[in-house]
Image (cartoon, coloured by chain):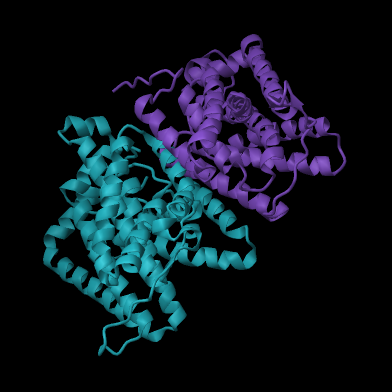
Chain colours: A purple, B cyan
Amino acid sequence: MHQFLQQIFSGLAAGAVYASLALALVMIYRATDLVNFAQGEMAMFSTYIAWTLVNAGLPFWAAFVITLAASFVGGMLIERIVIRPVENAPILTAVVVTIGLLLIFNATAGWIYSYTLQEFPSPFPDRTLFGALMTTRDVGVIAVTLVMLVALFCFFRFTATGLAMRAAAQNPDSARLCGVRVGRMLALGWGFAAAIGAVAGIMVAPILFLDPNMMGGVLLYAFTGALLGGITSPVGAVIGGLIVGVTENLVGTYLIASQLKLTVALLLIIIVLVFRPNGLFGTAVVRRV
Amino acid sequence: MAETFPVDGSRAKLALERHSGAGIAVWRWAGTAALIAVAVVLPFTLSNYHVFQLTQVMIYAIAVLGLNILTGYNGQISLGHGGFFAAGAYTAAILMHRYGVPYWATLLPAALVCFALGVLFGLPALRFEGPYLALVTLAMAFAMPQLLKYFDNWTGGKQGLVLTKPMPPPGLGIDRDRWLYLFVLVVLLVAIRVAANLLNGRTGRAFVAIRDHPIAAAAMGINTARYKTLAFGTSTLFTGVAGALAAIVIGFVAPESFTLFLSLSFLIGSAVGGIATIGGAIVGGFFIEFVPNFANDISDAAPWAIYGLTMLLFMYVMPRGVVGTLGPWLGHAIPSLDRRAAPPNDTNVKGGL
């Protein structure tokens, strides 16, 4: 029983990371209607920026904030330069473009920082709480994710820009008629997604170690979480991410060996798509013929 | 997907064809025969290593052809064809290694296994649209090396399987590399012929109709579920045969040869050559074989960087790929090729994405 609870808590911490990345995916899907396969590599690259800053002697949280700001700007630039030209292109073009971005980020990181594993500092002390039920690291990761979620919720719920962004995502034409600068809002959406991804990357790097390929598995689980929650629903993405994190941990502990981790993700994705294609909280897409 | 291209001058082309139909047929046959003759003679003028490289080019071309059938003609995006390539390679390798089946007899079982796998995968895929299918197949590409390592009783685990390289038939007087080149060439020609027959006929038109407008296609009486599954099966059949050939020619299979990079290689080969073309597959084969090799000399990261940049470049500048863009232009320049380059009722097929 003790081990079971322990696994659930560490699953929640992993799930918080998946939830963040899933949220980033959902933001981009809602804003620009495309699945961003480069999300994981973008997060990886942000994490390298944070690593460079920490190594340069900056305190962790200063590096954290600077990285988030840099990622935000980077995300907006990517939307502006790379994504805007293919905004209305066929799905295949969009998929190929984001795959191209994935490769470019991966290669650039490999080029600059090499493919060797790097240790990434954790901002949280390594202690256990409540009779070894959970570690302070797990609690820290979950807390950071929660703070981020609350901040995002307040932004979208209570600010004019947040409202404009929701309008632009939901109905670009009407939003434009109301005077919302839709293009700018979409760029903001990418900026937010990049920053959220950066949080996920920084939180997961102390556990996985830093290398250009570290986000492959995380991205798959984040996709699974986003699909499970419903790719149109931010709340769903978070809940889906948490469920996936716990499931992964329990399956890995009790059922199958961990060398089949990615296969579990594949199976989960197929199960969700076959039995509940709109996810738990997603809305069905109704198409006009 | 529904991109309509101006049917420029297709009436004129049609008229031209009516007037000189016989002449065109002769020219086409002569051209094809000349190309095949060059392909047969070529290995005898090159070094062993170059012959091996060209053999690889043809294998990749067959694999890319498979992807073109699915993604280019039918509009279903696969980022995981490396997985089916692996399935074909391991089918051939296990048959040769465990059961002593001669190399040439492994192609048919590999084709059948991969067709069955493709249909099995295609059935749930019917419910996945656009990016979701891309996602599922991406997950498969990630998971493939793990699965191959896990079932190590059959696959030899991490070490893989080492196969004895096939010998050329005695009395023919050619060495192994050139024999394998010719063997693969024959398979490639058969594959191109089969693909052309399939895609230029009723089935191909159904594939394209489903890609361009699934609802209209269904309204016209096309059984979309059946044709989509068929497209999947056919596509994986081609790619699986290519995998089997790779196992035979290289004489070795191991999980690390079938990573995400391989799947993305097929995708980029397809995009570079022209995703809805048959000839583009050969251009793609050349790209996959030679570009990463050159790039590796620069740095470890360079192949990925060049792949990524090429993907972006082609999507912005030449979304129909080399053959998809230059083919129709060539057709204008050489009227005798016109019928192949752009059949009047087929403009959309060559249209690309």
- B152 horizontally vs A275: left or right: right
Which is more toward the observer, A35 or A135?
Answer: A135
> In this orientation, does residue B183 appear?
yes
The image quadrant where one finds the N terminus of chain B is top left
How far from the left and from the top, in percent, is residue A52?
79, 44
Q: Residue furthest right?
A: A57
Residue at the (68%, 31%) spot, across then down: A199
Q: Residue at x 72, y 20 (%)?
A: A130
Number of disc labels: 0
Residue at point 62%, 52% (across, down): A107
Query: Where does the image place residue B244, in percent across and percent down from the top left?
Result: 34, 63
Residue placed most toward the observer, A211 or A175: A211
Tell me where residue B291 appears, x and y as whole percent: 51, 64
For residue A17, side relative to residue B123 (left or right):
right
Determine which quarter of the picture holds residue B218.
top left
- Front-most of residues B344 and A289: A289
Locate residue B113 relative to residue B52 in the image: left or right. Answer: left
